[in-house]
Amino acid sequence: MEVLLASLLLVWGNLTASQPDLTMEQLVQAAEESTHPIVEGTQSTGTFVKKDPQKDSPKVKGVYATAHSAGGARMETLLKLMDETELNSIVVDIKDDWGYITYNTNNPELEAMGTTQPIIKDLPKLMERMKEHDVYPIARVVVFKDTVLAKKRPELSYLNPDGSLWGNSKNPPDSFVNPYMKEVWDYNINVAKEAAKAGFKEIQFDYVRFPEGFEKRADVLNYTKDDRSRVDAVAEFVRYAHEQLSPLGVRISVDIFGYAASVPAAEGIGQDFEKISSFVDVICPMVYPSHYTTGWFGSKVPDAAPFATIHGSMLDTHKKLDPLGDAKPVIRPWLQDFTASWIPGYIRYGKHEIEEQLRGLKETGVEEFLLWNAGNNYTGDVDYKIVEQ
């Protein structure tokens, strides 16, 4: 008790001057972990304290599962893949690309929103199955791409000059909700808190941005905004999410465009790779070779050069994040386990192409990864041990 009290006094003296809203719960947690380094980084909104809430977590090597896969028969196939390979983690859609919460949370506030579609009928059973197979469970929460909420609450989204809800050019169109609005932040964080209560070890936020090409329509659409830049609005959401969720013992990760590590901040969509990374435990750049165009990393067709593309993207990622020092998050990229047949000069992806991507990670010191296949059909026989350092 004396040691804890001394730590409390030390932490209190160091933090309360710059963080007058620090709660006692956060203070006690900081004191209990005071033998570990506390990362402080000065941002536009004050001093941010970042501690990894799961220092003993495994080196994650995982795959993505839709809610339909996680709640259906395909889950057994994915668990078998976990058992038979070095893969050890599954990212499950808890709030999906349309905005649906994919299971019954029994949270009255969330249920009242009418945004639940219980695709996963028995989440406790799913969590137990993953635990039985020693799977590290990650909850994917799609944040600002949210057609369901935008239709129910247009005032949280963007309106065309004629008052209709804005949607992108897809068929059917997607709508986004507004990162400037705290109500949108709290809604998504409430979803994440329920996932943490359910037993997920990590919350992975996706679509943490404005719509693509937003800079071309920002002055035409009607929406709530303030004096913050789009970059600051997005980064402050991530910071707030970490502050709200870290006391629950879950890690925070964010998916981000892979090319964001290779270019200055994407002001249009509000993504600054370095700013976002300073507020997360894990950063997940989507570095699928098929997403890069001619000339990237010296390749005429980056999709046909999986090693060179991943190797180059990871070198750029380190270069971008090294200035963060102790605040540098774990780098866990999304890799390609699908064939991009729509690209001129594409190659078919299989065992060799996945292993070439893994080799690109190993040679740049990256030990964690996630595999993306929209249908959750993953290549067998891959030597995932390639990444072990």
Image (spheres, rainbow, N blue to C red):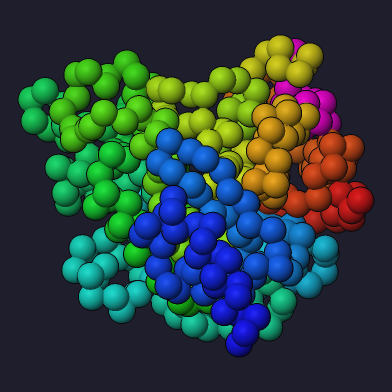
Q: Is residue 129 visible?
A: no
Q: At 36% across and 59% down in the image, what residue appears?
A: 21
Could you say which quadrant of the image residue 267 lies in? top left
- Would you place residue 317 above or below residue 20 in this image? above
Q: Relative to residue 321, is residue 361 drawn left or right?
A: right
Q: At 47% across and 77% down in the image, what residue appears?
A: 198
* Main SS of residues in magenta: helix
Residue 182 at x, y percent in the picture: 27, 49
Residue 307 inside the magenta-drawn segment: yes
Which residue, as the protein is rendered here, is positioned at the far left?
A: 162
Q: Relative to residue 333, is residue 364 drawn left or right?
A: right
- Would you place residue 25 above or below residue 228 in this image? below
Residue 258 at x, y percent in the picture: 62, 32
Residue 226 inside the magenta-drawn segment: no
Q: Nearer the viewer, residue 283 or 235?
A: 235
Q: Relative to residue 292, is residue 12 drawn left or right?
A: left
Q: At 40% across and 34% down in the image, what residue appears?
A: 232
Task: Locate the N terminus and report the quarter of the image it occupies.
Answer: bottom right
Q: At 64% across and 70% down in the image, what residue appears?
A: 33
Q: Is residue 82 visible?
A: yes
Residue 137 at x, y percent in the picture: 60, 68
Q: Which residues are magenta?
A: 300-313
- Would you place residue 140 above or below residue 323 in this image? below
Q: Nearer the viewer, residue 139 or 170?
A: 139
Residue 180 at x, y percent in the picture: 28, 39
